[in-house]
Image (spheres, rainbow, N blue to C red):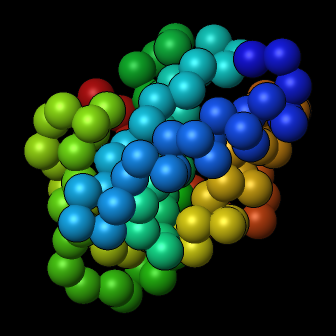
Amino acid sequence: MRNAHYLDELLDGLAAKARPDFPIAVRLHSHGCSVDLLLGLIQSFVYVDEPGPRRYYISVGDPQAEGATEFCLLGMHHTEWENRHLVPLATARRVVREFFNTSQRSACIQWEEGRY
């Protein structure tokens, strides 16, 4: 992507296609990583998949939150995440923009590290 303004326009266009009854997770590629973002709800998650050691990081909102949120990964595959990973959508978009600009995970949210 050319710049953060283009990123915002792209996410705005994708968000316009998502709905509360059909939320979608989109995947962006930046700095050699895949970054997933949930669109269509007032809350979202950010998932950063690093290419090297098969390691990922996912946002943590309220660690005590119960339940799960269902969505379509890339608009095709039914998936769900625990609600404890959700943060406000505006925060998630800011985190993605910061990663796009700096290649660093934002310190404004908590992250959980995992391996696969």
Horizontally, is 102 left or right of 99 in the view?
Answer: right
- At horizontal 24% and vertical 57% (from top left) the residue drawn is 22
In-front residue for pair 27/5: 5
Horizontally, is 58 left or right of 64 in the view?
Answer: right
Decide if residue 104 is in sight here: no
Would you place residue 2 above or below residue 112 in this image? Answer: above
Would you place residue 76 above or below residue 32 in this image? Answer: below
Q: Which corner quadrant holds the C terminus? A: top left
Q: Where is residue 31 in the image (x, y as percent from the top left)?
A: 71, 17
Quarter of the image for residue 82 reads bottom left
Quarter of the image for residue 92 reads bottom right
Q: Which corner quadrant holds the N terminus? A: top right
Residue, far left: 78
Q: Position of residue 72 (x, y in %)?
A: 22, 45
Q: Position of residue 68 (x, y in %)?
A: 21, 71
Would you place residue 81 above or below residue 96 in this image? Answer: below
Horizontally, is 3 left or right of 11 in the view?
Answer: right
- At horizontal 22% and vertical 66% (from top left) the residue drawn is 21
Quarter of the image for residue 104 reads top right
- At horizontal 64% and vertical 34% (from top left) the residue drawn is 10
- At horizontal 68% and vertical 44% (from top left) the residue drawn is 96
Decide if residue 74 is in sight here: yes
In-front residue for pair 26/61: 26
Give the number of callouts.
Answer: 0
Would you place residue 108 above or below residue 80 in this image? Answer: below
